[in-house]
Amino acid sequence: MRRFLNSLRGRLVLLQLLLYAAFLPLLFIGLDALARRNATATFTRHARSYATSLARELELSDTLESPSRTVIFLDGSVEGGGCLYAAIELNGRTLGSSAVETPEWVQARGDDADFGGSEDSVYAVAIPLAREGARGRLYLGFDKHPTLGQLHQARRQIIAALGLYGVCSLIAAMLVAGYVSRPLTQLQVASRRVAQGDKAAQLRTDSSMLEIVGLAADLENMRGELVGAADELRAEIGQRLTEQAERVRLENQLRHEQRLATVGTLAGGIAHEFNNILLPLILYTEEALAQIPADHPAHPNLTRVLKAANRAGDVVAKLLAFSRPGSDRPLVPVGLARVVNEALDFSQAFIPPNVQLRREIAAQDEQILGDPTLLNQVVLNLCSNAVLAIGPDEGVITVTVQVCESASVQLRIADTGIGMSSEVQERIFEPFFTTREVGQGSGLGLSIVHGIVTGMGGQVAVTSAPHHGAEFVLEFPVYRS
Amino acid sequence: MPTVLVIDDEAQIRESIQQVLSRVGFTVTTAGDGAAGVSDFFAQPVDVVIVDIIMPRSNGIEVINQIRAQFPGARILAISGGGNFSSLGYKPGTITTEAYLASATQAGADAVLSKPFRRDELIATVRNLVKN
């Protein structure tokens, strides 16, 4: 009900009802008064005309000279004029019709000024008479019942007509409201579709009403502008989000590179110090070994010292390999696809049966500036890590070489292993960082990969998630001779 | 008896090289920094100068340049353990042992050895320099 009253149709019906409440009673009163005036005027005119004609007839005839003829005249007047009574007062003598008894109040009442109300059913008329010195009055009483009945019937007809008018106009109001509200409803449905994301929904209506057509055109224009603005805004937001993501990525990459550079500087310094420590250690040990016979009790231990020193030298060499920003040896044009294929052939030797190696090697003709030996080391390092990440379960290593749009060749080595957290990824290229148990690895493998790749002008990145494998993406600029 | 001058800021390196070469018949003197080494060489020229590249104050490249300027025929063996010391002025951007030694070769070193080297490598290299 509340919904109906708040609708356009409900409001129009309610307005119609209020108008009826205000104006129908007034209309009824007006029409009733008009009908009453007309009916009573006709009645009184007729009664007075009749009474006047009788009076004139009495004045002109000698009826009044004979009481009996007067009574007969009055009886005829009653019967022919629809009177309730007829009486004459002449020179103080009163005669009434014999057919109807004349009430006593006739003379006292005299002449009614107007029709009066329904409380009295008699309309009294008193017409003066004058005949040869005799003066008197003719009293006639007319029955008001027929006229009052006509008035009541007219009133009923007025009520019926007004009621019928009210019902018809209410129905008409509802139809008009429907006619007006239908195009508005169409616009509302279309606008809701637009709001729900249907940008193609047009705000149109089949109404021919100028105001509705104008409103629809304005709304459609507004929709077009809003949709355009929304598209622009969405595109701008998308672009900004992309730019922001790219900025964050570059910031992270820069921070990562700076961190690695710092670590590299530190590693280089440490390597220098270690080499300076190792040199006298090795020289003294070798000198001592040269001075004693092979069966000397100290010989085996000195040999062990020398072996340990040499191993330490290897570690320092790896540390320096990470910290190098450029290749020691001159870089030459090499086909990355060929080098990767050769490295993978070699890697078959250590890939266990539970691990499947897939090659997706394209870019056969593309060359990069690099060192084949070091690239070989990179592939073997990454494949070795992938095998360890897969462990004893079944797994796949996918090696891809492809050309990128940015004039670079991409080497991807993906595994289905245990993956790594973002914290591990953040530090994965740092020297001596390892997630393996003590003794299971030096933590230098990936730092060497990073040093080699960046030394060739390339980039290396890793994407991974715990239990969802890892993918190392190496990108090298294409060499054009 | 061939003479050798070892210039290195690390005492243990100086002494270990001195001991190794002395045992095989070289007369070895030492200096703890570049300036002292150049001064010693000018005072008493030797057959072979072994100079470390990375040293505080006067570095190995400067030593090679100064000796070469006065004694073009001097035989010089440059040694380096690498590290990032680009702030010291050695070929900025290169931090590897090989890069330092390449700089030394460019400056005029006759031979280079990367620390840590083996006793036999040292002896063979010095003997080769003396022979030539």
Image (cartoon, rainbow, N blue to C red):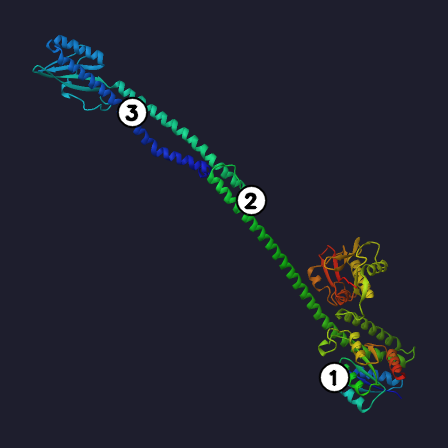
SS category of the residue bearing label 3: helix
2 vs 1, front mark = 2
Q: Is residue A185 left or right of residue A22?
A: right
Residue A450 in the image: state x and y as whole percent: 75, 65
Marks 3 and 2, how far apart at CA:
60 Å
Residue A110 in the image: state x and y as whole percent: 15, 21
The residue positioned 80% from the left and 68% from the top of the image is A331
- Which picture quadrant has residue A127? top left
Q: Amino acid at mark 1?
A: Ser
Work out whether residue B50 or residue A475 is closer to the camera in this orientation and state it. Answer: A475
Residues at discs 3 and 2 both on one chain: yes
Above or below, A378 relative to A122: below
Marks 2 and 1, how far apart at CA:
79 Å
The residue positioned 17% from the left and 11% from the top of the image is A74
Q: Is residue A100 left or right of residue A443?
A: left
Chain assignment, label 3: A
In the rendered picture of this protein, how many numbered marks are placed on residues? 3
Marks 3 and 1, how far apart at CA:
135 Å
Does the CB distance between marks 3 and 2 fall below 8 Å?
no
Above or below, B18 relative to A74: below
Q: Amino acid at mark 2?
A: Val
Label 3: few (<14), some or many (≥20) within 10 Å? some
Provide the residue designation for mark 2.
Answer: A194
Q: Amino acid at mark 3?
A: Ala
Above or below, A461 relative to A269: above
Provide the residue designation for mark 3.
Answer: A35
- Which picture quadrant has residue A124? top left
Q: Quadrant of the N terminus of chain A?
A: top left
The residue positioned 17% from the left and 10% from the top of the image is A73
Question: Which numbered disc covers residue B58?
Answer: 1
SS category of the residue bearing label 2: helix
Question: Would residue B129 be visible to someone looking at this image?
Answer: yes
